[in-house]
Amino acid sequence: MSATLDRLQPVTVSMMNAIHDLPLLVARDEGFFRDEGLDVTILKTPGTGQHGSDHQALRDNIFSRTMESLYDGGKCDQFRMCEWGIMKRAVESNLDLEEKHRPAKIVALGSAMSSFAIVTDPKSGIYEPEQLKNEPIAVSPFNGSHFTMLKMMEGFLKRSDIKWTNAGTHRERLDALRAGKVKAASLQEPWISVAEAKGARVLIESRSTRSEAAGDELDGPTLAKMFRAETRAAEAINRDPGKYAHYILDEAGGAIGPKELKLWRILNAPPQPYTRDRFDDNYQWTLGWGLVPPGATYENTVSNRAWQ
């Protein structure tokens, strides 16, 4: 039975793009958070996947981007992004010797298993990843489209031959691709389906796992309640993704309809502890690309207190 309204514990979280935050939205709207005794407020911030996005999520200084600055300023308690994006933000906030930023720790391997794809225009004559040697691929820096693109392409090219360029939001990247300004773009849903509907070719595709971040102020039992609600939401979405596709379609601004969105790309899983082995692998990978500073440890970056 749901907790009564006057006993609900308030928690404020932030989100950007629906494909990454779908369990969060569903847990709120289906009452799963309420069933755990939580009153969760979701602050929707500009993300690169929203059709009307500005460039606030593309600022070079990640801590001046809207979602990060809301957390930094104490306006929310918790946020989630791609695994490597959370790694970067957690590492940099905890190695902040001048204490300019509010520390955040990785508190879970998140529930969204979002698809990213590198797409090309068939007119470009690109048929395989190797043909993108030294060709800039359109991404948004330090976000999922950037990190996942590097992960995908390094299986085919030397790191020194992998190039990227900031071509704006997902809609702007697709426009640049169709205009011939770039030969490839890294996209997430719904923009992969939009690209396919407009005749683009998917060259390579992969899942990109979310991670969840929070400050020390959000205690373990509260996080455990949130993750139980998100687990229920993930199960509900996996049973019937079409029921919740409207959250994702809204971000395309009418560019595609329900029949054109590939529902099989919507995949979610229960939040899990962030293991030392996973931290070691992903921190060293991110460090190897020069995307984070050295000196981070599992102890000062990760807290699995929801399972303790």
Image: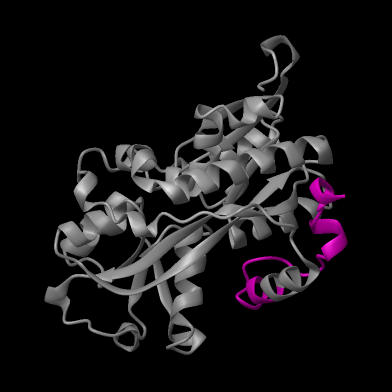
Q: Is residue 236 magenta?
A: no
Which residue does the image show at 68% across and 43% down from the upper left? 227
Whether 32 is drawn above or below 91: the answer is above
Q: Tell whether 122 sits left or right of 250.
A: left
In the displayed structure, 46 sits above or below 170; it is above
- Tell me which residue sits at (49%, 68%) in the image: 148
Q: Which colour style is shown?
A: one colour
Q: Vertical placement of 193 versus 19: above or below?
A: below
Quadrant, the N terminus: top right
Tell which residue pokes out farthest to the left in this image.
123
Specify start and end residues of the magenta stretch as a single range.
284-308
Residue that appears at 19% across and 66% down: 200
* Residue 96 seen by the camera: no
Percent x, y for residue 248? 36, 43
Residue at the image point whose x is 82% and y is 44% from the top? 99
Residue 161: which quarter of the image?
A: bottom left
Farthest top residue in view: 6
The quarter of the picture where residue 95 lies is: bottom right
Residue 304 part of the magenta-drawn span: yes
- Residue 237 at least partly seen: yes
State left or right for residue 256 relative to residue 81: left
Q: Residue 267: image x %, image y %?
A: 46, 56
Q: How many marks?
A: 0
> In the rendering, at what x and y percent does residue 138 appear?
35, 65
Image spot of residue 57 (x, y percent): 48, 45
Q: Nearer the viewer, residue 112 or 67?
A: 112
